[in-house]
Amino acid sequence: MISSWVSAIIMLGIFVNGAESENNIRPCAKLLTSSSVVPIGSPITATCVISEDCPLAIGQAVHTEWHLGDRLVPSSPVANMSGRVSKAVISSFNHTRAFLTCSIQGSPPQVVAGVELRAGYPPQAPQNLSCQTNLTTPNTLTCNWDAGQRETHLLTKYTLHTEIWDSNKTYTYTLPAGVHHLNIPRSDFVLFFEMSVYIRCVNDLGEATSSPITLEPISAAKFDPPKIVKIQVVPKRYGCLRLSWCLSRHQTWMRDQRLNIEVRLKTADSREWGEAIAVNNVRPSRHMDQCRLLHWTQYFAQIRVRFQQSPWSEWSSSQSGVTLESAPTGHLDSWMKVSRENMPKQLNIHLFWKPSKQFRANGQSVSYIVSIQKQSAEKGMVCFTRGNHCTLQLPRRAKKVYLTAVNSAGKSSPTEVRIRHHKDREAILYLAAVPQDDSSLQVQWKTAVTPDLMGYVVEWRPLLETDLSYIRFETAGKTQSSLLLTGSFEPYKPYGISVYPRFKDGIGLPQTVNAYLRQKAPSMVPEVQIKKTWGSHIELTWDEIPLDQRNGIIQSYKIFYWNEKGPINIVYVDPAERKVVLQDLDTVSLYEAFMMVNTFGGSMNGSTIHFKTEPFDAVTIIMIVIATGVGLSLLIIFSVLSCFSKHKRLKRHLWPNVPDPANSSITQWTSESTQNTYLGYDDKEPNLVYLSHLSFLDLPMKQNKEEDLWSNSAEDTSDLGESICGSPFIPGYSGSNSDSVPYATVIFSGPSNSPTPKEPPMYLRSESTQPLLERQESFSPKCYQNMVMDGMSVEQCFFGPSHDGAPEEGADPFVVWDDFPFLRALAMNDIQND
């Protein structure tokens, strides 16, 4: 921007000086240069001569200075010129355009002369010259070329030169600046005469000429796209089509010329065109045949045309034709699923098939026959269909079936299909299916090492379709572990993919997985319902999302719930579940909740529900109490049962085991049965006391108050307990009870089977409110004996009325035993001791 303003100012100064010079007829100064246009980087020398009558230099010394644009250029005065001549040298001019000025020093400096300098490059020879004839109206010859890779930065003029050899005519065409193409009119060339063409370019630094080309305009003509008139079959020739074609209406005058054409074909179900087929020297009025095509197959055809080596025309529009029909050829790929469920004597078979790479239907309408005979498919036919599957029932002994394709022209050779039963054998350990691109799925699996494994069958179908015709399959070798499935897969739709292992003796158990080509958020969220509420718990349920609304594989359900006081809580629910229990809620609180459903492609939130928790009601409390009571009762029952099952061991820990005196003798009592342990507070070694206790059970019906008091003061145990309570060996014993009647208690120093003690045993009294005999006796017997003395009978060795121990004369010893019948148990004799 600054240089532009400087240039404008310099030109204005020069214009003013020039105006003054016109008035005075003589300029104020002259500026001479070695050249005003130079190659970039070349040196430039300039000289400024100020005239004697220049008004700016009269009466004063002259000092000049140079400027190249806005930059000061060093200068030097020329000798003997009184300072009116100045010289400037630019060693390298690297600008494409700049102004050089000469000024007289002053305040401000005055420009007295100037010149525009330009720099660039000489032109390069044009390259890639080519010409093409247009046969449409109007006919023209269009030539194009490249000006070269280097910019000249100078004004360069281009001219095109033509010379027609047979007529010796030449033409020159001048082109505008920057234009590198030219349309030669039809009057300046002849279609069938050769001519030469070249380009010349010129600028201030030089000129250049392109290499000439020689051409015949008709050979450089690009024809309009031809037209296929019709395509028809060749009579009695299978696999052949006949094409009839013509040129466009602008080139119909060429219909008798021999032209070169190319034909390309593709089948109706193909996306790519086949390789072009060249046919040379063909007149447009003649048809041409294309053979070696598939039978009864629809083909689309296109053609293009040129004259000799001229450019090819564009491809024509497509036309279609169908080859002749013939019998099907090749075999079919098949997949059989065998079941014997509910039919022990028959086989339920689902047979699927598809064309192999070698199969050719060779007809428009193809049907399929499944038969059990190879030679005559019609007689052994068990299925006839136009689809790709068949369900049939065969006897259990059937080993194979035959599959034949049929059309109106004939039938194919039968394809043998062996019946392979399904076995309960597993081989597939892992299976996954992931999208590969927008139209395919990559299936991968892992297999256990199995010697008789022969291969795999990969089966897939859309889960939203129940018709068996949607089932597709592919076979894989035993060394494969992946397969790319291609087809019309739709996004957001579920597909079931199964891989079956094939063994020598049958088909193993499959592994199945669901897959989506693409996933997104579900189209709906199930409505959450409140099923049950109790206390601080609430159970929520919901229905399963319909398969066509999922849009992907459900990963989880999330329940968000909160009340007006607490934070938001999240519960994750397994995709297989349809209910959840929210626990530890605040009772009598209002809650809000909603559900979020997640897939790999996104998530969606459901509507918000409101619910209120309730306090525990009376029924719930009663049930809790009942449950607690039942638990305690069961605990008590089990404890009692355990005690009864081990009552002897328990009884031994709680009280001594006292034998029944009425049903045993003292000699049968053992030390273990008569031991009672008294433990002191100091936990010393217990003192063993051996007891023999007899009690009379003939009690009166009426009890007095003293008896009640006595019974309340002692434990309710047995007669033994009462005797112990009245024993002087018990602490707190008091013998002042005047109403008590003594019992006889014998205390031994050892068990009955121990040696006879040296000292006689002691007899102790036992206080009781029960009378010993019917008539009242004294408080205590008058005589106690413990051994046989001289003059005393054996029968009276225990009790007797004598005060001195002598036997009472005339007393009957048996009467004493009759009065004490229960004391017979204390009798010791040799037989019992034995």
Image (cartoon, helix red, strand yellow):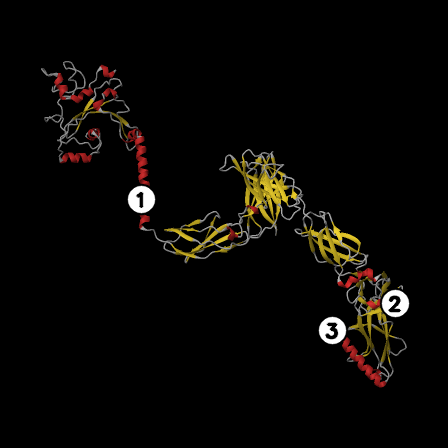
- CA gap, disc 1 to disc 2? 126 Å
Question: As rendered, which of 91 and 316 lies closer to the eye?
Answer: 316
Quarter of the image for residue 100 reads bottom right
Of the 4 image quadrants, the one containing the N terminus is bottom right
Mark 3 to mark 1: distance in Å?
Answer: 105 Å
Between residues 162 and 753, which one lies in front from this camera angle? 162
Q: Does residue 587 sit above or below 775 in this rendering?
A: below
| Foreground disc of the pair 2, 3 | 2
Would residue 647 appear left or right of 764 to someone viewing this image? right
The residue lying furthest to the top in this view is 790
> Label 3 sits on what residue type?
Ile
Q: Nearer the viewer, mark 3 or mark 1?
A: 1
Q: Are marks 2 and 3 in contact (CB under 8 Å)?
A: no
Q: Tell me if I can see residue 158 in this picture.
A: no
Return the residue at label 1.
626
- Whichever of callouts 2 and 3 sits on the residue coming sooner in the sequence is 3
The residue carrying pointer 1 sits among few (fewer than 14), some (14 to 19) or many (20 or more) residues within 10 Å by Cα, namely few
Query: Looking at the rendered structure, which numbered label has been put on residue 2?
Result: 3
In the rendered image, which residue does mark 2 sit on? 170
Q: Looking at this rendering, what residue extends furthest in the bottom direction?
A: 23
Q: Which amino acid, mark 2?
A: Thr
